[in-house]
Image (cartoon, grey):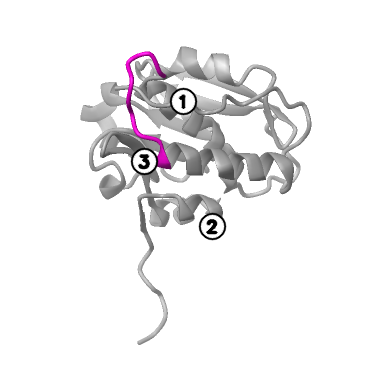
Amino acid sequence: MTQPAPSRPQPNNRPNSRSGPRSLAVFLLCCLAAAPLLAQSLPTEDDVKAVYLFNFSRFVRYPAADPPTAKTFDICLIGHDDIGPLLQSDVQSENVNGQPVRILQLPRAADARACAIAYMGSSEASRIDKDLAALDGSNVLTVSDVPHFTDRGGMIQFVLQNNRVRFAVNLSPAEHAHLALSSELLKVALTVNHPPSTEAP
């Protein structure tokens, strides 16, 4: 399936901010959510997922380390998928909050505990529960296109609806990992599963 071409991330050597880059990313997410998958000559579903995956980085606030330890912003791909080469092309010279972006292909989820984002493609379908358990207690944003990913404790799941690549969000595991997802991201999500209220009745 194909989709009208989203704007590719352009090289940006400045730290992420709340002005230009953030507004551009909001626009990109809205365009991707609205654009149907149409002609064969246009970008594939994987192209769109790759652009989404990078731009999620601009809408997540991670717990601050004191002192800061991460030298790079690592987007880690678990198992085998077709997104890796697309991401490598998209994020050349990109950075997130001043950290150069790296794309790492890892054989096991347990190796991704220090990553910023972990993507589990269809090759991990039979191991999703084990993968999520391996990442429990880390501060990793978990993303997948495996069906029922958010129902099983994942944070963001790609969903194909009416020939459009959309995404669903489960906030409970994100909060458990001490990650704050921007309201701007939630506005363009297909669905958002909020954590149960802890207020007394």
Q: What amino acid is at disc 2?
A: Ser
Residue highlighted by disc 3: 166
Whether tag 2 and tag 3 are in contact, CB under 8 A, the answer is no
What span is colored magenta in the figure? 34-42
In the rendering, at what x and y percent does residue 17 appear?
74, 44
Residue highlighted by disc 1: 50
The mark nearer the N terminus, 2 or 1, is: 1
In the rendering, at what x and y percent does residue 91 appear?
60, 21
Does residue 48 lie above or below 171 as drawn?
Answer: above
Callout 1: SS: helix
> How would you classify the magenta stretch by its main secondary structure?
loop
Query: Whole-Å distance between the Cαs marked 2 and 1?
Result: 21 Å
Which residue is at the far right?
Answer: 14
Residue 84 lies left or right of residue 103; in this view the side is left
- Magenta segment includes 79: no
Q: What amino acid is at disc 3?
A: Arg
Residue 40 lies left or right of residue 57; in this view the side is left
Query: Whole-Å distance between the Cαs marked 2 and 3?
Result: 16 Å
In the rendering, at what x and y percent does residue 199 appear?
42, 80
Does residue 143 lie above or below 186 as drawn?
Answer: above
Q: What amino acid is at disc 1?
A: Ala
In front: label 2 or label 3: 3
Neighbour tally class for label 3: few under 14, some 14-19, many 20 plus, Cα within 10 Å = many
Neighbour tally class for label 1: few under 14, some 14-19, many 20 plus, Cα within 10 Å = many
Which residue appears at 46% of the width and 16% of the height?
Answer: 84
Residue highlighted by disc 2: 183
- Magenta segment includes 35: yes
Quadrant holding the N terminus? top left
Neighbour tally class for label 2: few under 14, some 14-19, many 20 plus, Cα within 10 Å = few
